[in-house]
Amino acid sequence: MRPYGYSSFRYELTPYLKFDSENVLAVKVDNSVQPNSRWYSGSGIYRNVWLVKTGKVFVDNWGTFISTPVANNEKAEVLIKTKIKNQSGVKGDLKFKTTIIDPSGKSPVHAETKAEPWESVTEEFTHNINIEKPALWSIENPQMYKAVTEVFFNGKLTDTYETPFGIRHFDFDEKDGFSLNGEKLKILGVCQHHDLGCLGSAINTRALERQLEILKEMGCNSIRTSHNPPAPELLDLCDKMGFIVQDETFDMWRKKKTPYDYSHDFPEWHERDLTDHILRDRNHPSVMMWSIGNEVLEQWQHIDADTISIEKANLILNFDKNVPANVVNSGEMSVNSLITTKLANIVKSLDTTRPVTAACNEVNPWNNLFKSGALDLMGIQLSSSEL
């Protein structure tokens, strides 16, 4: 079961398949308890489902992480971390090769690693590849590369895994603002909910593309995924069309906004859902920042249920069960500040290349999210009367 309808996930079906007869896969969606959202969420399976077939030694789900520690017009350093999984139950000779395909379709460079013999269940390997005079990804010219990973086990090709990526560098500066590839850029963005208006919520790539085309014509150059992980197709389009993305995970944490929303599942599922979100999206060059929450009620001390039981705090924060309650909610660092810190730390454990923010509609310094000190960028939302 996955209670958060916006999360992508994968299940290993091999143990349940009957290879000598027909198989039936049944997926049940239960969206009957309402209201569970502040907007139209849709219902049913409205994003794509894929059947992935590999050999017994393969690149793990979302198993590559590509970053560019050096990225300029003269040179790019492409750092590729690849997690390979072994479900063969035996040791053998492992070889995997990463080939970089440039925007023109050429394959100028590759790297290769061997492990002989190899018997790990899961292991992460690193390739560091230099590219001379790279084509940089930008708003005006969103050039895309592709890394193709081929896995060989005992001389047999067991998996091929493709990872699109872009080469770019960016910076958020408190004095000079945002810059992309060394050039100042004013971010002109919109909040983009996942539905397609009168077309509903079922994924339609051309409808998404048309929305982005209209936004481009308006002068928009950035998207905030309001207020949940988007369909992967949206980020693919933003990569291709040249949009900056603030990729957002949650609309609420443990405090509810509607009677049956994700707040009921947050204590048990927030770590898994946030982790899967970052792992899925971290190779997209369009993604420039992560948002861990939108207008969450944890900003304020006076909201009901601000002080929670030590048992629930342990569940959310993984505190030692003997931590006194007055430490969990101590005033200066309330449990809400500690939740902020935990979420930000989850993101940074998976990706240190982008800043973490949250959309806050409490602009005063006593905001619990601000007090945590965990946010790299202060996301402040003002009403028209406050401007």
Image: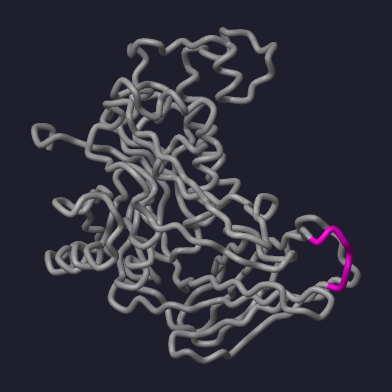
Question: Number of callouts in the render?
Answer: 0
Q: Which residue is at the front of the view, 15 or 156?
A: 15
The residue sitting at 49% across, 72% down in the picture is: 164
SS majority, magenta: loop
Image location of residue 200, percent across then percent down: 21, 50
Is residue 92 highlighted in magenta? Answer: yes
Image coords of residue 243 (percent x, y): 30, 65
Compared across the picture, whether 352 is left or right of 256 comes to right
- The answer to whether residue 150 is above or below residue 1 is below
Image quadrant in which you'd find residue 91: bottom right
Look at the picture and state if 386 lies above or below 241. above
Q: Locate the C terminus by quadrant.
A: top left
| 182 is higher (above) or lower (below) than 246 | below
Residues in magenta, as a range: 88-93
- Which color scheme does this rendered protein use? one colour
Instruction: Tell me which residue sits at (63%, 52%) in the image.
Output: 12
| 113 versus 200 height, above or below | below
